[in-house]
Amino acid sequence: MKRYPFIAGNWKMNKTVGEALELVRGLKSSLQDMAEVEVAIAPPFTALFPVAQELKGSSIHLASQNLFWEEKGAFTGEISPVMLKEIHCRYVIIGHSERRQYFGETDATVNRRIKAALKFDLKVIFCIGETLEEREEGKTFTVLERQVEGGLKDLVEKEVKDMVVAYEPVWAIGTGKTATPEQAEEVHLSIRRKIERLYSREISEGIRIQYGGSVTPENIKGLMERENIDGALVGGASLKAETFSRIVRFKEM
Ligand code: PEP
């Protein structure tokens, strides 16, 4: 089945508003004729609104790096789905390993956030991935199954249909170590099979699975050649227009 490739840039806690606008302008000009790949960028919260303004009329989508499950209220430091909808945010990254590692995110809170995003018609980039220790102990597939089951708990077919899963082995994030295309493909296939068992073949074949973990212009092509790798979630290499654009233009290499 042909799935439309999807490359997203996660800027994490980088870029002031001025820097963000400069980067977006660079991306708009280098990706203006890009039609074969869907592109999204996830700036930090302070830059979301100005970046949304700058993206008007462009095919680059806006993504948030997180969201809270309540609509409003006394939740200091959080951002609501309503606020993200208002500024035309299309995607939200949920369950990134840095949220799990440093901010107490669990499968249960990931599940609550996913439900809130779907309720407000935000598309979800659902991150999962094993740590180095878990991989070395041979627990990769068990951990991923648990994360998929927990994150998607109580969700029905029509809710997961448009979801994007990002497989990000924690040992490959920001480390310069990439999973080989073979390693990634093996895991992507297992995630697809798991989704098929939970839902149906139709659903699992339609869901896009991105790879994330030290993706660069040099390694993207090899990854994208694999049948079950449908895109990438890019951290470090998304912070420069030139490198991110080369990743998005992987087909031209
Ligand atoms: C990420 O944070 O989603 C990521 C994959 O980071 P990096 O590309 O820097 O490894």
Image (cartoon, rainbow, N blue to C red):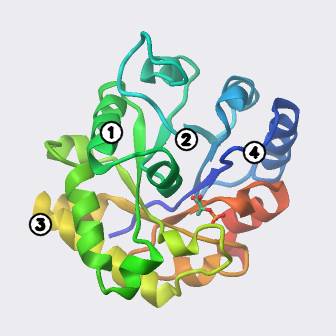
Q: In terms of secondary structure, where does tag 4 sit?
A: loop
Q: Nearer the viewer, mark 4 or mark 3?
A: 4
**Mark pair 4, 3: CA separation:** 39 Å
**Mark pair 2, 1: CA separation:** 13 Å
For the residue carrying disc 3, how many other residues have a C-alpha within 10 Å: few (<14), some (14-19), or many (20+)?
Answer: few
Residue under pointer 1: 114
Q: In terms of secondary structure, where does tag 1 sit?
A: helix
Going by the numbered disc 3, the residue's amino acid type is Arg
Going by the numbered disc 1, the residue's amino acid type is Ile
Residue 197 bears which disc, if any? 3
Q: Nearer the viewer, mark 1 or mark 4?
A: 4
Q: Is residue 98 left or right of residue 236?
A: left
Residue appearing at x 32%, y 70% in the figure: 1
For the residue carrying disc 4, how many other residues have a C-alpha within 10 Å: few (<14), some (14-19), or many (20+)?
Answer: some
Q: Is residue 243 left or right of residue 140?
A: right
Residue 65 bears which disc, if any? 2
Residue under pointer 4: 14
